[in-house]
Image (cartoon, grey):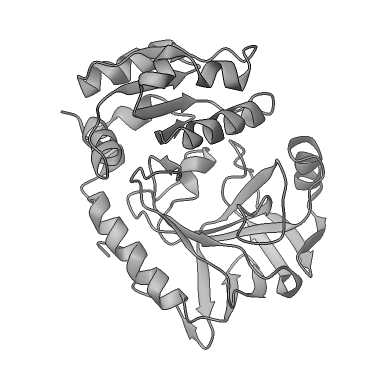
């Protein structure tokens, strides 16, 4: 079986055997291609955006499913609908695996490399233990990033690619994330990676933060968030990428934010890890940072490196 099939089945089945799998998709042809790779009996349901979330979530196909694969290309128009649908699936106890903005590149063995996801899970768990005692973080880069903040008392969450009840798993995966203490978050970020969802700027973009709020930025970025996030300005996330098999941009934030050695931030919703609540969540990646934890630089934390 191709590696993509192995990774998907491993993710779905680690914590609960697959009894009934359902594809929810806006791309039927790609869905059938994945189903053939998985070699598993599974209905594929095209998601009609003109049907209410509750009606779709109560359909016979969804009712019977124990595991659900989301094969979507989220957009401004459908992202809120899809998020509401996912929350309803969680309420029903479904295990959900998100494959967002996938294309043919994700079907190649070379994309997945030889690193097992169990190694990512172990390394991420180890890093979380180290971070639990850290109070202050500073991120710098050769391009000019210089941002400092406190994480004291904040909860860290792990995204290791394995489906669990009430937790969204994605593939590819590999990150650990929290929300900075908002009033401590000040400095400059120079973005040289992908921005939600599919924008990879040609040139690095500078952003200025003060007390947790974006106060200035490159015109292209400010125009983007006015369009994409309703003008949201408050910090909502800090995360460390933990997947070294991702080592270049794919112009897909769901992939690029997992790049081993990168960090990313987000303005907008903090996933209840901080104070910011919003229907929007805009991520942006810094690809080659230095991560300062209290009085030392974080090193040798990636799996297989």
Q: Nearer the viewer, residue 139 or 167?
A: 167
Q: Is residue 296 left or right of residue 152?
A: left
225 relative to 2, above or below: below
Number of marks present in the image shown = 0
- Image location of residue 46, percent across then percent down: 48, 12
- Position of 129 with respect to 46 (left or right) is left
Front in this rendered view, residue 91 or 196: 91
Q: Horizontal placement of 213 versus 173: left or right?
A: right
Q: Position of residue 203 (x, y in %)?
A: 65, 48
Q: Write the residue at 38% across / 13% down.
A: 44
Above or below, 283 relative to 43: below
Quadrant location of residue 236? bottom right
Q: Residue at x 56, y 28 (%)?
A: 85
Task: Specify the quadrant that holds the C terminus.
Answer: bottom left
Image-based side of 16 in relation to 211, left or right: left
User: Residue 55 at x, y = what percent?
Assistant: 57, 16
Residue 156 position, x and y percent, is 49, 65
Q: Is residue 28 visible?
A: yes
Q: Quadrant of the N terminus?
A: top left
Could you say which is closer to the camera, residue 257 or residue 207? 257
């Amino acid at each position: 079986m191709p590696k993509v099939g192995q990774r998907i089945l491993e993710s779905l089945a680690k914590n609960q055997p697959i009894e009934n799998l359902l594809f929810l998709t806006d791309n039927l042809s790609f869905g059938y291609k994945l189903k053939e790779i998985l070699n598993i009996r599974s209905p594929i349901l095209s998601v009609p955006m003109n049907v209410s979330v509750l009606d779709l979530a109560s359909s016979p196909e969804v009712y019977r499913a124990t595991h659900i694969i989301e094969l979507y290309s989220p957009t401004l128009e459908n992202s809120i609908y899809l998020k509401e649908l996912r929350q309803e699936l969680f309420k029903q106890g479904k295990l959900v695996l998100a494959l967002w903005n996938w294309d043919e590149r994700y079907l190649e063995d070379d994309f997945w490399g030889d690193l097992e996801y169990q190694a990512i899970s172990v390394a991420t768990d180890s890093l979380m233990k180290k971070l639990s005692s850290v109070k202050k973080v500073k991120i710098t880069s050769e391009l000019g990033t210089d941002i400092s903040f406190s994480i004291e008392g904040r909860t860290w969450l792990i995204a290791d690619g394995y489906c669990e009840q009430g937790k969204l798993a994605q593939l590819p995966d590999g990150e650990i994330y929290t929300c900075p203490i908002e009033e401590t978050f000040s400095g400059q970020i120079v973005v040289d990676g992908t921005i939600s969802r599919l924008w990879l700027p040609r040139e690095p973009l500078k952003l200025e933060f003060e007390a947790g709020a974006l106060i200035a930025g490159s015109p292209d970025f400010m125009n983007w968030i006015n369009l994409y996030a309703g003008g949201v300005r408050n910090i909502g996330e800090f995360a460390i990428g933990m997947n070294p098999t991702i080592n270049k941009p794919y112009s897909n934030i769901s992939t690029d934010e997992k790049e081993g050695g990168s960090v990313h931030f987000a303005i907008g919703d903090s996933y209840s890890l901080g104070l910011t609540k919003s229907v929007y969540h805009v991520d942006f990646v810094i690809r080659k940072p230095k991560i300062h934890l209290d009085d030392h630089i974080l090193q040798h934390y990636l799996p297989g490196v």
